[in-house]
C-alpha cells in the first residue's frame, strides 16, 4: 500500500480538488491511503475534509509554521501504514492514471521520482519534488528530513546512492509562480531557505542519514 502524506492549512477547497485527483486516477482504490495533518487553529478545514472524505486519515499538530514543515511530514509518516511514503502538497493535482500501480510495481529500495508540471503544461522539475520512498527509509532514520526542504533532503540521499528512479508520474503544481493558483496567505507566508541545507551542521546531519542508509543497504539486497 501507498501512504500519501501531506500537511494542509486553510485550503479546504484546494485540498478537496487534490484528493479527488488522487482518487479519480488510481487503478485500485484500496492501494493507497491519504493522511492529512492540520494546524490546531484550522479545525474547520479538518472537519470539512472529514465530512467529504471519511476514508482520509486526519491529524492535528500545534501550529509551528513553514520553517518546521518537516516536522509535520515526520509526524504523519510515523502513522503511515503503507510500504511507500508519497510526499504530497495540497496544491497538487495528479495527472497520471494508474500512478498507484506505477509505484507498487517497483520492488527495490529506491526513491521514485515524479515529473512536475505547471498549470500551463510546462515541465519544470523532474525527480526532486514529491519523492516517493519506502517506509523502511523512515523506519531506519526515525524521520524523513531534519529540514523544511524535505524533498531536497531525501533527494540528496538517494541521488548520492544512485537510487533515484524516474517514473511517468506527472503532477500539476498549482502555485502562484507557476500559473497563478492558490495565491493566498499560506503561499505568501512560506519561508524558503535553501541555504540552510548547506550549513555545516545540516550537512553533518545529512551525511549521518546517508551513512545509516548505506549501512542498511550493505546488509540487505536492494
Image: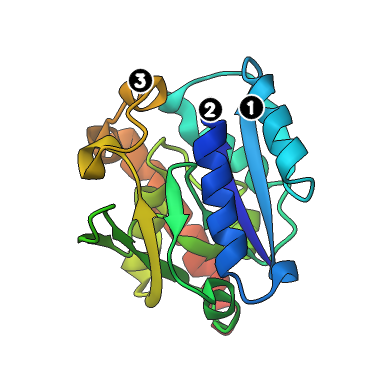
Q: Residue at x 41, y 35 (%)?
A: 148
When the figure is inspected, residue 95 is found, relative to residue 142, above or below; the finding is below
Q: Which residue is mark 2?
A: 9
Report the residue marked by disc 1: 45
Tell me which numbered mark, 2 or 3, is placed earlier along the sequence.
2
Instruction: Please determine whether, in this image, residue 195 is positioned above or below residue 106.
Output: above
Mark 2–mark 1 Cα distance, whole angstroms, equals 8 Å
Q: Residue 135's image quarter?
A: bottom right
Name, please, the residue furthest toward the right.
Answer: 54
- The span from disc 3 to disc 1 (Cα, nearest Å) is 18 Å
Query: What's the coloring here?
Result: rainbow
- Disc 3 secondary structure class: loop
Q: Earlier in the sequence, mark 2 or mark 1?
A: 2
For the N terminus, the image quarter is bottom right
- Select label 2 or label 1 by which is in front: 1
Query: Camera-side residue: 222 or 62?
Result: 62
Up/down of 76 relative to 222, above or below: above
Instruction: Give the residue drawn at x 71%, y 68%.
Output: 29
Asked whether residue 204 is in view, the answer is: yes
Q: Nearer the viewer, residue 109 or 82?
A: 82
Residue bearing the label numbered 3: 189
- In contact (CB < 8 Å): disc 2 and disc 1: yes
Q: Is residue 79 left or right of residue 204?
A: right
Q: Secondary structure at mark 2?
A: loop
Q: Position of residue 107 (x, y in %)?
A: 58, 83
x then y, percent, for residue 40: 66, 18
Alpha carbon distance from label 2 to label 3 = 11 Å
Helix, strand or loop status at disc 1:
helix
Task: State the image coordinates of residue 67 (x, y, percent, origin top left).
Answer: 41, 25
Amino acid at each position: 500500500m501507498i501512504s500519501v502524506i501531506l500537511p494542509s492549512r486553510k485550503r479546504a477547497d484546494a485540498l478537496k480538488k487534490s484528493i479527488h485527483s488522487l482518487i479519480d486516477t488510481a487503478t485500485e482504490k484500496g492501494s493507497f491511503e491519504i493522511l492529512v495533518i492540520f494546524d490546531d487553529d484550522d479545525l474547520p478545514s479538518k472537519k470539512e475534509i472529514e465530512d467529504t472524505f471519511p476514508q482520509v486519515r486526519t491529524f492535528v499538530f500545534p501550529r509551528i509554521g513553514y520553517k518546521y514543515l518537516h516536522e509535520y511530514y515526520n509526524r504523519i509518516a510515523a502513522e503511515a501504514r503503507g510500504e511507500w511514503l508519497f510526499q504530497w502538497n495540497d496544491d497538487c493535482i495528479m495527472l497520471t492514471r494508474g500512478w498507484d500501480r506505477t509505484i507498487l510495481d517497483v520492488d527495490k529500495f529506491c526513491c521514485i521520482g515524479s515529473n512536475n508540471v505547471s498549470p500551463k503544461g510546462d515541465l519544470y522539475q523532474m525527480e526532486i519534488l514529491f519523492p516517493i520512498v519506502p517506509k523502511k527509509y523512515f523506519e531506519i532514520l526515525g524521520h524523513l528530513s531534519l529540514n523544511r526542504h524535505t524533498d531536497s533532503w531525501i533527494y540528496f540521499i538517494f541521488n548520492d546512492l544512485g537510487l533515484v528512479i524516474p517514473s511517468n508520474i506527472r503532477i500539476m503544481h498549482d502555485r502562484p509562480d507557476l500559473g497563478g493558483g492558490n495565491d493566498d496567505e499560506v503561499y505568501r507566508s512560506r519561508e524558503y531557505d535553501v541555504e540552510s541545507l548547506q550549513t555545516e551542521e545540516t550537512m553533518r546531519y545529512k551525511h549521518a542519514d546517508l551513512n545509516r542508509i548505506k549501512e542498511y543497504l550493505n546488509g540487505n539486497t536492494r
